[in-house]
Amino acid sequence: MVTLDGRRSNASSGGGALTDAWSLSSAPKRNAVRLANQTSDRATFVPDKAGTYVVSLVVTHSTGAKSAPDTTNVSVISAERVDTKLIVDNPSSKAFYYLGEQMTTKGRLVDADGNGIPNQTIRSKSVSRVLGFTFDYPIEPVTTNSTGAFTKVFDPISA
């Protein structure tokens, strides 16, 4: 959710009541975005497409005088386009795991600047080969903590 804040708007002389009017003047094609609280000093919207959303605010004084539109651009990128990296802290040097043996993976999900990405779900699978047959085991997803770190224990017996 994007919150637009116009609380710093003021009447330059004489005080008086102000009325806010937010509008969405441009948005990505085929979007279904609607501004909520358009006459409040804080409007909100939830972007539904990647792209640039241009939002304008016009403030009207109780005397009827209107401000020039003040615009801001909100750029939204798709989660698939975010430059992320999964860093595994404990890569295993073991070539084989035996039935009943647990594997623990620890790591961190980071953005392009190396900052941890919190509250993201990571899904993976384990591939096993036995006597020429390949088995894919879905591993229960794990969610990163507030620093982007995670720990996952995989138990092939329960998989």
Image (tube, rainbow, N blue to C red):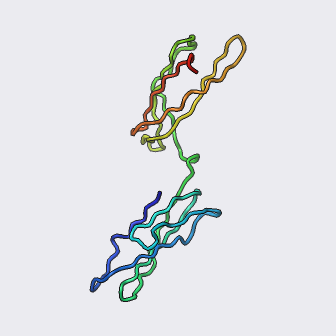
Residue 89: give x, y in percent of width and height.
Answer: 45, 27
Reply above or below: 14 against 154. Answer: below
- The residue sitting at the left extreme is 14
Q: Residue at position x 48%, y 66% from top?
A: 36
Reply above or below: 142 against 127. Answer: below
Q: Residue at position x 67%, y 20% from top?
A: 135
Residue 154: give x, y in percent of width and height.
Answer: 52, 22
Residue 123: give x, y in percent of width and height.
Answer: 56, 33
Q: In the rendered picture of this protein, how many numbered marks are placed on residues?
A: 0
Q: Residue at position x 42%, y 84% from top?
A: 66
Using residue 18 as the reference point, say whether residue 98 is left or right of it. right
- Image-quadrant location for residue 17: bottom left
Residue 88: give x, y in percent of width and height.
Answer: 48, 28
Nearer to the camera, 57 or 157: 157
Using residue 60 as the reference point, say whether residue 30 is left or right of it. right
Using residue 29 as the reference point, say whether residue 52 is left or right of it. left
Specify the quadrant that holds the C terminus.
top right
Using residue 91 as the reference point, say whether residue 11 is left or right of it. left
Q: Residue at position x 48%, y 23% from top?
A: 153
Nearer to the camera, 99 or 8: 99
- The residue sitting at the bottom extreme is 63
- Image-quadrant location for residue 26: bottom right
Nearer to the camera, 63 or 75: 63
